[in-house]
Amino acid sequence: MAAAWSLSRFPDRYAVTVIEAGQVCGGVACSLERNFPMPDGTRLRAGINYGVQGGSPAAHQNTVALMSRFGLTPSPVELTVSFGKGENNWKNYERGELQRRLKRETARFGRVLKWIARLEPLCIFMSIDRLLRLFRFSDDFRYRMVFPLVALFFGTGNQTKDVSAAIVARVFLDESMAIFEYHAEYMLDATPSNIAFDNLEAFYESMRASMAKSGCRFLMRTKVTNVERGAQIKVAVEAAPASWRAGSEQPVQAFRVGPTPRVAQALGESPPDADGDAPSSSPPTGPLEFDELILAVPANAALRLLGDPSRAERRVLGSVEYFEDLSVTHTDEAYMRRHNEIDGRAIYFIKTLESQPSCCEMGFDLTGYQPELVPVRNGNADRVYQTIFLNKAARDQWTIDEIDPSRVIDKSWWTAFSHTYKHFRWVVPWVWSIQKPGRTLYAGSWTLFNTHDIAIASGLAAAHRLGAPYPFDDNPRARATFKTVLAASHLKLA
């Protein structure tokens, strides 16, 4: 969407077509609406972002700038995190026994992080686990302090121990990425100010409507099946399955959510029926022809679509390692209390799996920070939580069966890459080699690391390569992220 929007600013120069498999734009930046029973017997309808949530203001300036073009301002939120449970619990807003017991190692780790930053060209290829073992940090420090903290940022697929050590250091030391300030004794110093996004489905629908008025063509509920590149780029399409949402095809047993009523109305459709279905549209017959193509899709999907991938494309796209995670949005507070320390203040929860302490389960109190859920919280309705079960291959360790089915609002599968050291060895340094040959450009967070802002910046970089100037020059931090993406993924200077 960012690439298409940037190009659509110049309708006299570009005829832009967006092919979207979903019922709405935005991919994993998705929303649903629900009627919440209130204590007084009334029902309150509110939206929930169940994919992308928010993040660090410094690391999301392209997102903030893009939202401002459509009249949206993210809400500030205090990032409060509770790690572990019982004697192994620690928080970033209180000092606990575990932090006091491990404060010598915490001080040493702070010094090690600075050396990692200095030696980044080497440490980018080293896992955080290997580095911690090399410097003989204790199991408690690794499993109870560092790995849960890394999972907070890079939990995808439960590959925490293999996350690149250099990327972990950047979370503390890089101004454009830093979320926490490092505390020499307690690891985390104070509670940083984060941002929470408003209804993302409504935001992306505003973008779509504005772009359509500028002449941008949208093919919704349309799935690309094959790409052939010759004198013209030929794209074969078919109708996307009705189960497609949140950026991927959901299993039939998963909950099905159509566009929210406000978006359905804007699309000129009826709201979803009782089964969650929304009216379908027929894709064009025959292949579509284009002069240039931007594949803003996961790397593995791009490789499947290409009928003639080059050796470089096979190597780079095939090296991105993906994992399947399952998020459950629910109101089962009893489950949350069994597995986490709930005190009414923490909004993020990281649970260490006792059977395999290098692995974690992630949880969120959505009512605690999502803007549209403020009336739900103020009305003392049931709090809305989300639990993410990581890595389908390790589902025998999941406790999903303990969640009361009657309290489940939604289940969604996500396919995402993980930030292991291998990603920075075999993918990131070589993305530039597949940009532009065959008149094909690639965009998506997989080109660097997995944040919504990197995804947006990568789209703006692709549009930039086609001649659309970067739109946020007046925002130094946004431009810094864009320049990083352009240099890393295209070997170009802005």
Image (spheres, rainbow, N blue to C red):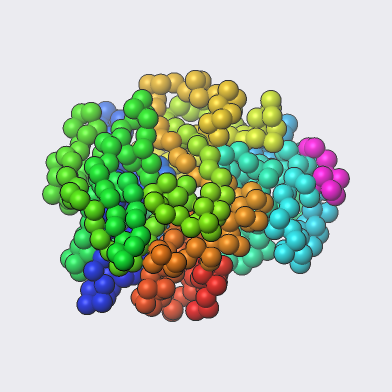
Residue 363 appears in the figure: no
Q: Residue at x 67, y 51 (%)?
A: 421
Q: Quadrant of the N terminus?
A: bottom left
- Given residues 327 and 161, the one toward you in this image is 161
Can you give x and y, in whole percent of width and height, for residue 133 in the image? 82, 44
**Quadrant position of residue 213:** bottom left
Q: Residue at x 73, y 31 (%)?
A: 87
Specify whether residue 128 is painted magenta: no
Q: Count the numbered circles shown.
A: 0
**Quadrant position of residue 464:** bottom left
**Quadrant position of residue 10:** bottom left
Q: Is residue 467 left or right of residue 435?
A: left
Can you give x and y, in whole percent of width and height, for residue 279 in the image? 16, 39
Residue 282 appears in the figure: yes
Q: Is residue 354 left or right of residue 480?
A: right
Q: Residue at x 26, y 77 (%)?
A: 13
Q: Residue at x 19, y 67 (%)?
A: 215
Can you give x and y, in whole percent of width and height, for residue 195 in the image? 47, 56
Is 409 drawn above or below residue 161 in the view shown? Answer: above
- Given residues 419 and 72, the one toward you in this image is 419
Residues shaded magenta:
132-140
- Given residues 214 and 147, the one toward you in this image is 214
Q: Is residue 356 left or right of residue 447?
A: right
Can you give x and y, in whole percent of width and height, for residue 196 in the image? 44, 53
